[in-house]
Image: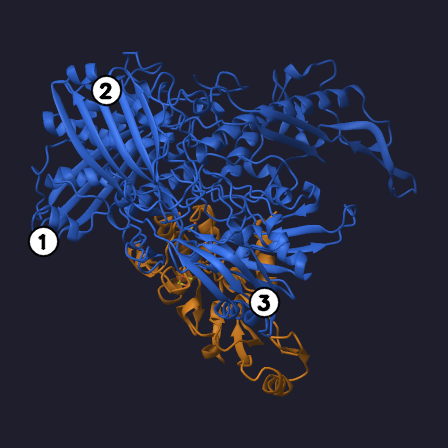
Chain colours: A orange, B blue
């Protein structure tokens, strides 16, 4: 159960299962389903004039082009969880203080709880599921597991994404650079001393193409 | 005292136990985001629920009009405390006080769930509906300042009786607890002769200690999603319940909803960090009812702010300690004022201190403990004590103050006062303590100096501190172990969901050790229906459950060996496809062993068969194939074996009241700080831990547990405190921006050394380390050692400067 191989396949499946094109447009107030965005908009105008209708966002999520209907005030974390089935970006503080919801957007680590989903239109986003599914990053996941850089594991995906964002920019970091890169991530279980060890080991393996 | 009662408790050779870098069985799922916690579940067609939360610290809902809220499009249901469905809910949570209805109209902390639950198509609609409720509040006087709340003229915030708090029974022959007065309940214990104790003292010191409220912050805000379904296996009695996120035990939810256990499903394994917080939140209990009422899945989750719970209670302590010129303690008078919290708060960490405490580790018999537990409107504490259980800090500070007063090393003072290994009257040294101290001194280059006497080259003052604790024995209750030898493989069925502790890995390591297998050979089958769970007591519980699993593994081993002999005695009929039996005819199980995954002769381990092929029977299975001549091929049947064991290692000191009176495994912790007296800044240069968990089972988990408690300690001594607006009783920093936890750049080095005295009662003489390292004053004492003044935790720069008279 939850073996290395199974988890990798599951992560890949989750990452690939994002909705490609919207076929149904559902009213968030009354659950009515419509065939097009225009129909949904006019339904709102008539039936729920006080409510703000959902909007469409299109993203390149873990390499897949996809779209979803979101509430315009939703954060990216919420959109990932509720519309794209991606729960790796965790909700811990919801205020930009813990890094548990970290994703990579256009090459930069960003906090999904502090980013409005609607502002991500057209962006390229990578989540922990996408990283886990990518063979290049297997050594990072494996080092994290070998070094037990987790206890309850709730904060861990956020750390792993921050670590990946670091290695993207700096494939050969020092221990201090690892700590600096992870300084926005809080681990309440206190796993801090293991992260740099895991990242440095992974960096070596990735460099060797292991 | 070592693991003498169990099989192989004295084992000397370890192949698997003690190995590093064996990945956790769930680590891949956790690291990759595949692991789902309660808050993560999203179901199609799901509704959302939210509670009305009190804006007041103490208030009563006199009436509520839900008409406007109900009319909002998207609202599916609104229930109030007066609804029969709500009244019918049972309250099974730990409660220190008289029982309350599951939901009522009283809110006794700001943010308390009260009176109304709204169910709607989205959380946003829930919130809008909550805003449109017409609530008539009766605002009541509140207590968030314990020192005010204990005064005779303070408003009484809760009328119910609390004369005999849990864990707080008066000692035999001791004074009885006076009846509750105002907001204050009492827990008193006395032993020995206080007057004689103080009369025998050459010195008497008195001092005050403060412990801030410490938010453990369970990393994943609680929440659940529930739905009802037709279960073809258990169709009688209507629909079955599926709930995710109820974590600890779905059986409590079964009880709450009066369902047989088999009609409640919870498959998710991941429960997040718990840190000894065993309480279920309302958001984890209400979804089944709401799902039943609406006929749709319902999700209810807390926000971070709604779940900023406290795990260590605020406490004020005044200690009076008498001691001789040598430093021998003759009497301790301990008075404390502890937060009783909101209605229903756990009493753990309050009066439990009285009976399980470090005072039991002292030679001194003359101890008076007097605790006032003050009802407050601060927070509901689900359980408390992980962080600083049982008043260790009082003793740690006392030893340091005696040392300072006499100009002696606190380690020597501790040694003088610690009783021997067997009882309070045992004058012998404690071997585990001596071993830890020796290692610890080397680790830290320990060279104690009196307060304010050592300056570092950069001009900052150097301080150091030490404290000892025992590694407790945590085998409270029995473990229901089961191991299966199925199709040639060993399976360890275990229940989820799991905490953030690698307990099950330790169990698997022990099973592999005993069965001559590798760690990966033991398959862990997570199944919520299984009874075995290694939980309870962190690493202590882990070692205790590992002891039980060790016994079970040896029962299975015997069965496998006997099956191998039986197979050798009764080989299958010729023509069957079957492995060759081993050369075991005429032997007994005692003649065999399992080594390197093979069942072998003890007398000649080169002779044997792989374990996978050891246990077949003479029975033949149905035709499975035809050979090239068309002759049917029949395979021999593999024998499946099941071993069970129910029990726990002997001598659970918690249960026998012996905690602290026997000292087998100990641990010591050290801290070194540098204090800048111009800026008031404290840098922890390093923590050191020399610990004897008896036997190190899974080193990397042990290290991780130590890091965790050291960083918890750092947080509450330098950064963390729960702040209230006393005028309104409102919480001022229940979020992760204003309540700061240490980050990776804040935490210091933690140097660790482990000893293996094998003196514990659990598997192979292990005891675990669990709570025992947590403390609130290790850093504070080091600061005192640096600058010679006391600073209450959290020791922020402004407080340091103030204590130095500079601000
Ligand atoms: S949840 Fe986004 S930073 Fe904490
Ligand atoms: S592993 Fe639990 S919060 Fe980091």
- Mark 1 vs mark 3, foreground winner is 3
The answer to whether the residue labelled 2 contacts the one labelled 3, judged by CB atoms less than 8 Å apart, is no
Determine if marks 1 and 2 fall on one subunit: yes
For the residue carrying disc 3, how many other residues have a C-alpha within 10 Å: few (<14), some (14-19), or many (20+)? many
The answer to whether one can see residue B380 in this image is yes
- Name the one closer to the observer, A155 or B168: B168
Residue drawn 27% across the image and 52% down it: B746
Residue on which disc 3 sits: B120
Residue on which disc 2 sits: B417
CA distance separating discs 1 and 2: 38 Å
Q: Give the letter of the chain under mark 1.
A: B
Q: Earlier in the sequence, mark 2 or mark 3?
A: 3
Residue B805, percent from left and from top: 7, 48
Residue A142 to residue B560: above or below: below
Name the outermost residue toward the right. B630
Q: Secondary structure at mark 1?
A: loop
Residue on which disc 1 sits: B807
CA distance separating discs 1 and 3: 53 Å
Q: Secondary structure at mark 2?
A: helix
Q: Quadrant of residue B784?
A: top left
């Amino acid at each position: 159960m939850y073996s290395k191989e199974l988890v990798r396949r599951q992560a890949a499946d989750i990452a690939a299962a994002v909705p490609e094109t919207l076929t149904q447009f559902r009213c968030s107030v009354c659950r009515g389903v419509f065939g097009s965005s225009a129909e949904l908009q006019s339904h709102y105008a008539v039936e729920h004039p006080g409510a703000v209708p959902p909007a469409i966002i299109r993203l390149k999520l873990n390499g897949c082009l996809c779209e979803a209907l979101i509430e315009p005030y939703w954060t990216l974390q919420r959109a990932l969880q509720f519309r794209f089935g991606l729960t790796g970006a965790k909700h811990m503080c919801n205020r930009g203080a813990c890094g548990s919801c970290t994703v990579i957007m256009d090459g930069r680590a960003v906090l999904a709880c502090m980013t409005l989903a609607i502002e991500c239109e057209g962006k390229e986003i990578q989540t922990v599921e996408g990283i886990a599914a990518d063979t290049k990053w297997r050594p990072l996941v494996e080092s994290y597991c070998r070094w037990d850089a987790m206890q309850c594991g709730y904060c861990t995906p956020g750390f792993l994404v921050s670590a990946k964002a670091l290695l993207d920019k700096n494939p050969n970091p020092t221990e201090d650079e690892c700590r600096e890169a992870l300084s926005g991530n809080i681990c309440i279980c206190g796993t801090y001393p293991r992260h740099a060890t895991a990242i440095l080991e992974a960096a070596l393996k990735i460099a060797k193409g292991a | 005292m070592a693991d003498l009662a169990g099989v192989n408790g004295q084992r000397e050779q370890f192949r698997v136990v003690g190995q590093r870098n064996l990945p956790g069985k769930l680590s891949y799922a956790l690291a990759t985001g595949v692991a789902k916690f309660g808050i993560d579940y999203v179901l199609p067609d799901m509704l959302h629920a939210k509670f009305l939360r009190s804006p007041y610290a103490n208030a009563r809902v006199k009436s509520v009009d839900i008409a406007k809220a109900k009319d909002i499009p998207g609202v599916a249901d609104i229930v109030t405390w007066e609804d029969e469905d709500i009244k019918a809910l049972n309250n099974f949570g730990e409660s220190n006080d008289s029982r309350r209805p599951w939901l009522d109209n009283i809110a006794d902390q700001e943010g308390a769930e009260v009176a109304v639950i709204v169910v709607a198509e989205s959380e946003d609609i829930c919130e809008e509906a909550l805003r449109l409720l017409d609530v008539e509040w009766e605002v009541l006087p509140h207590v968030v300042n314990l020192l005010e709340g204990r005064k005779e003229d303070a408003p009484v915030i809760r009328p119910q009786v609390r004369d005999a708090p849990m864990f707080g029974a008066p000692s035999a022959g001791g004074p009885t607890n006076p009846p509750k007065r105002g907001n204050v309940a009492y827990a008193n214990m006395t032993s020995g002769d206080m007057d004689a104790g103080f009369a025998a003292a050459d010195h008497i010191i008195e001092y005050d200690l403060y412990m801030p409220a410490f938010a453990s912050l369970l990393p994943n805000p609680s929440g659940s999603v529930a739905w009802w379904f037709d279960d073809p296996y258990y169709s009688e009695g209507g629909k079955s319940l599926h709930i995710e996120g109820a974590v600890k035990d779905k059986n409590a939810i079964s009880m709450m909803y009066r369902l047989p256990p088999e009609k409640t499903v919870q498959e998710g394994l991941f429960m997040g960090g718990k840190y000894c917080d065993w309480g279920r939140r309302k958001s984890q209990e209400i979804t089944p009812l709401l799902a039943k009422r609406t006929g749709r899945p319902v999700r209810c989750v807390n926000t971070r702010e709604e779940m900023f719970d406290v795990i260590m209670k605020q406490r004020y302590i005044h200690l009076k300690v008498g001691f001789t010129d040598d430093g021998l303690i003759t009497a301790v008078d301990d008075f404390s004022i502890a937060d009783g919290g909101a209605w229903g708060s756990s009493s753990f960490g309050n009066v439990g201190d009285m009976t399980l405490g470090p005072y039991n580790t002292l030679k001194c018999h003359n101890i008076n403990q007097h605790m006032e537990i003050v009802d407050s409107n601060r927070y509901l504490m689900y359980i408390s004590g992980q962080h600083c259980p049982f008043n260790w800090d009082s003793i740690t500070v006392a030893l340091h103050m005696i040392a300072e007063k006499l100009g002696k090393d606190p380690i020597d003072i501790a040694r003088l006062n610690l009783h021997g290994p067997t009882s309070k009257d045992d004058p012998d040294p404690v071997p585990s303590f001596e071993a830890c101290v020796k290692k610890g001194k080397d680790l830290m280059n320990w060279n104690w100096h009196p307060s304010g006497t050592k300056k570092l080259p950069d001009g900052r003052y150097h301080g150091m501190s030490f404290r000892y604790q025992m590694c407790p024995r945590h085998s409270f209750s029995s473990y229901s172990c089961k191991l299966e030898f199925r199709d040639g493989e060993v399976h360890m069925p275990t229940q989820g969901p799991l905490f953030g502790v690698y307990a099950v890995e330790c169990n698997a390591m022990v099973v592999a050790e005993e069965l001559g297998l590798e760690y990966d050979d033991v398959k862990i089958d997570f199944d919520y229906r299984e009874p075995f769970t290694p939980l309870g007591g962190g690493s202590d519980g882990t070692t205790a459950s590992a002891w039980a699993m060790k016994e079970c593994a040896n029962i299975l081993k015997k069965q496998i060996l006997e099956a191998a002999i039986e197979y050798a005695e009764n080989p299958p009929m010729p023509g069957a496809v079957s492995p060759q039996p081993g050369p075991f005819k005429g032997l007994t199980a005692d003649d065999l062993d399992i080594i390197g995954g093979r069942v072998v002769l003890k007398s000649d381990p080169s002779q044997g068969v792989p374990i996978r092929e050891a246990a077949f029977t003479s029975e033949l299975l149905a035709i499975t194939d035809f050979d090239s001549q068309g002759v049917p091929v029949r395979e021999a049947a593999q024998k499946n074996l099941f071993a069970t064991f129910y029990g726990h290692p002997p001598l659970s000191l918690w249960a026998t009241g012996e905690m602290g009176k026997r000292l087998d495994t100990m641990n010591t912790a050290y801290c070194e700080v540098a204090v800048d007296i111009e800026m008031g800044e404290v840098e922890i240069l390093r923590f050191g831990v020399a610990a004897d968990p008896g036997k190190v089972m899974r080193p990397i988990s042990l290290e991780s547990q130590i890091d965790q408690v050291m960083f918890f300690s750092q947080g509450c001594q330098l950064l963390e405190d729960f702040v209230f607006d006393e005028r309104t009783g409102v919480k001022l920093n229940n979020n992760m921006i204003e309540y700061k936890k240490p980050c990776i750049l804040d935490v210091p080095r933690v140097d660790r050394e482990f000893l293996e005295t094998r003196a514990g009662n659990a598997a192979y003489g292990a005891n675990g380390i669990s709570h025992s390292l947590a403390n609130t004053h290790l850093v504070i004492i080091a600061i005192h050692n640096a600058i010679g003044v006391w600073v209450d935790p959290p020791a922020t720069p402004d407080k340091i400067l103030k204590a130095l008279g500079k601000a």
